[in-house]
Image (cartoon, helix red, strand yellow):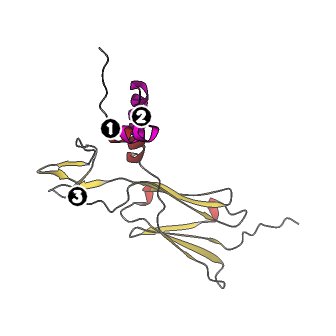
Amino acid sequence: MPVRLPRSKASSVLEKRLRRTMSADETRRLVAYARALKLRRNQQRIYKPRMELWDDGDNPLVTAVFELPGLRPEDVSVDVVDGRLIVSGERRQHVLSTTASAQAIDEHDEDGDEAVSTAGRSGILQVREIKYGFFRRVVSVPAGCTTNDLEATMENGMLTVSWPRAHTQARIS
């Protein structure tokens, strides 16, 4: 006896549009595709941190300030590749326990929501407004500028990166 797959709302809408019923194989493929889409949505996405770019014509340096709250300098990478400043890293989600120590969330309930489980406290995340995961921001820099030309400092979650307005190469005579 063949196994009958459950009908989903998507498959019934498709059947109406196609004006025919879908075969078990088509339904199976549709279900697999829907699961793949859901999995893809749940994967971490790369986001861009907010930034300010300061360019004063009188100053020989151009300065960019990146908003990276909650990150330590070792969580952030600053590089120059092919004339582009690349600021990247990862912000991991942490939950404060009742003892004020942090631990990463790695559990999910049956609906896919994060299930918070810490010493003495458990629950489901109710509001998510903070962006977590991988981040990357790219800014053009003058040709010839290298990572060695950068001045970078991080204080209170604000990364400040400065570089020369125009790269000057030493002349050989």
Residue beneath label 1, please?
A: 8
Amino acid on which the number 3 mark rests in the picture: Gln
Q: Which mark is residue 89?
A: none
Vertical arrangement, residue 35 with respect to residue 26, above or below: below
Identify the residue at the far front of this view: 19
Q: Nearer the viewer, mark 3 or mark 2?
A: 2
| Image position of 77 (left or right of 36) | right
Cα–Cα gap, marks 3 and 2: 31 Å
Q: Nearer the viewer, mark 1 or mark 3?
A: 1
Position in image of residue 34 (x %, y %): 40, 39
Cα–Cα gap, marks 1 and 3: 28 Å
| Image position of 20 (left or right of 171) | left
Quadrant in the picture for the C terminus: bottom right
Position in image of residue 162 (x %, y %): 58, 71
Amino acid on which the number 1 mark rests in the picture: Ser
Asked if disc 1 and disc 2 are in contact, CB closer than 8 Å, the reply is yes
Residue 25 can be seen in this image: yes
Give me the residue at 29% from left, 31% from top: 6
Q: Quadrant of residue 68?
A: bottom left
Considering depth in this image, is 37 or 129 the residue closer to the camera? 37
Residue beneath label 2, please?
A: 30
Majority SS type along the magenta span: helix
Task: Specify start and end residues of the magenta stretch as a single range.
Answer: 12-36
Amino acid on which the number 2 mark rests in the picture: Leu
Give me the residue at 11% from left, 51% from top: 120
Secondary structure at badge 2 equals helix
Considering depth in this image, is 17 or 168 the residue closer to the camera? 17
Considering depth in this image, is 55 or 130 the residue closer to the camera? 130
